[in-house]
């Protein structure tokens, strides 16, 4: 059965690969489709579509919307979104501004802890006006400064939910993220629910109106996958899957290698149908 990796990132957000590289890796893995789902931006989609021309692979335009609930980040994936629509892009710009404010607060806290990190040193990592910077870029700077030995250590000690520099300023709710995607004509899927350790919230979002749930993800263990599969079947949700590929951190792929966590193409068709109905 043909498969699709429905969760990948590029340099448009916090991945290390150009969009064309994601397309190449997906084609080499024998996938039927790959989704470009950068954080709060659609800047990598056009280049991915161009790279797919002449290849036997579909690029699915997507986005991963940042929201917050119960003191932690909650991510909602949007598929078949209107990536070339200016009104939709304007809403995403507002989300990126919130991310920028969070970066400033986090870096300020790191400096309070005696770490000689600056906003300028982190933001030099991205070129252009649309500097979609996130925690992985701050983590890279901490590694370069010698404060930590790895990206994982940076998140464990400083940037993760229990980290000394973690901050989470007001963001849209996951319900608002779902609504944003659906009103734009896309299909809304809860990303990596296993990361949240909050099944009550997952059930609440299902009841609110999710179209799907990410069952196959490197951070969902076997018991979680089975639980989400059961809930999807009970509520008629699309079961999706993706590697959450962000390129490489050193020699290792992060979160997982593109193509190692996937969903059948039947999931793509269901997402396409949902989005098409909303655009009528």
Image (cartoon, grey):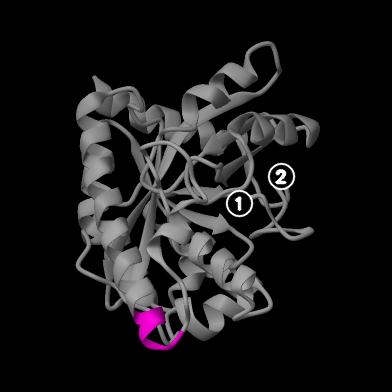
**In the displayed structure, does residue 121 sit left or right of residue 177?**
right
Pick the quarter of the image with the C terminus: top left
Residue at which label 1 appears: 246
Q: Going 61% across and 51% down the picture, which residue do you hit?
A: 246
Residue 132 seen in the current view: yes
| Residue 77 percent coordinates (x, y) | 41, 48
At label 2, counting other C-alpha atoms closer than 10 Å, the crowd grade (few under 14, some 14-19, many 20 or more) is many
Pick the quarter of the image with the N terminus: top right
At label 1, counting other C-alpha atoms closer than 10 Å, the crowd grade (few under 14, some 14-19, many 20 or more) is many
Residue 259, label in figure: 2
Quadrant of the image occupied by residue 3: top right
| Residue 152 percent coordinates (x, y) | 62, 75
Element type at marker 2?
loop
Say if 112 sits above or below 253 in the image: below
| Residue 13 percent coordinates (x, y) | 47, 46
User: In 3D space, how far apart are the residues under numbered discs 1 and 2 (Cα atoms)?
Assistant: 12 Å
Magenta-colored stretch includes residue 111:
yes
**In the displayed structure, does residue 164 sit left or right of residue 180?**
right
Of all residues shown, which one is farthest toward the top?
A: 54
Residue nearest the viewer, comparing 174 with 1: 174
Front disc: 1 or 2: 1
Say if 272 sits above or below 219 in the image: above
Q: Earlier in the sequence, mark 1 or mark 2?
A: 1
Magenta-colored stretch includes residue 158:
no
Q: Going 53% across and 60% down the picture, which residue do you hit?
A: 229
CB contact under 8 Å: marks 1 and 2 = no
Residue nearest the viewer, comparing 252 with 143: 143
Say if 150 sits above or below 49 in the image: below
Total count of labels: 2
What span is in magenta?
A: 109-114
Residue 207 seen in the current view: no
């Amino acid at each position: 059965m043909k498969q699709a990796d429905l969760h990948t990132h590029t340099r448009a957000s916090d991945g290390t690969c150009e969009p064309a590289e994601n397309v190449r890796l997906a084609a080499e893995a024998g996938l039927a489709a790959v989704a470009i789902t950068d954080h709060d931006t659609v800047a990598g989609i056009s280049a991915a579509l161009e790279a797919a021309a002449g290849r036997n692979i579909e690029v699915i335009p997507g986005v991963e919307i940042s929201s917050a609930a119960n003191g932690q980040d909650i991510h909602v994936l949007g598929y078949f979104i209107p990536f070339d629509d200016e009104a939709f892009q304007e809403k995403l710009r507002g989300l990126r501004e919130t991310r920028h404010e969070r970066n400033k607060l986090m870096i300020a806290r790191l400096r309070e802890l005696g770490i000689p990190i600056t906003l300028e040193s982190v933001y030099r990592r991205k070129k252009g006006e649309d500097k979609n910077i996130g925690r992985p870029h701050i983590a890279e700077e901490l590694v370069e400064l010698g404060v930590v030995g790895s990206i994982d250590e940076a998140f464990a000690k400083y940037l993760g939910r229990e980290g000394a520099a973690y901050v989470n300023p007001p963001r849209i709710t996951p319900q608002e993220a779902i609504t944003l995607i659906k009103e734009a004509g896309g299909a809304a899927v809860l990303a990596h629910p296993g990361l949240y350790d909050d099944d009550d919230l997952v059930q609440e979002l299902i009841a609110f109106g999710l179209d799907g749930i990410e069952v196959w993800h490197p951070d969902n263990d076997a018991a979680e996958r089975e639980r989400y599969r059961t809930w999807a079947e009970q509520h008629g949700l699309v079961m999706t899957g993706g590697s959450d590929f962000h390129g490489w951190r050193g020699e290792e792929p992060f979160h997982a290698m593109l193509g190692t966590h996937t969903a059948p193409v039947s999931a793509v068709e269901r997402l396409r149908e949902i989005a098409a109905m909303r655009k009528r």
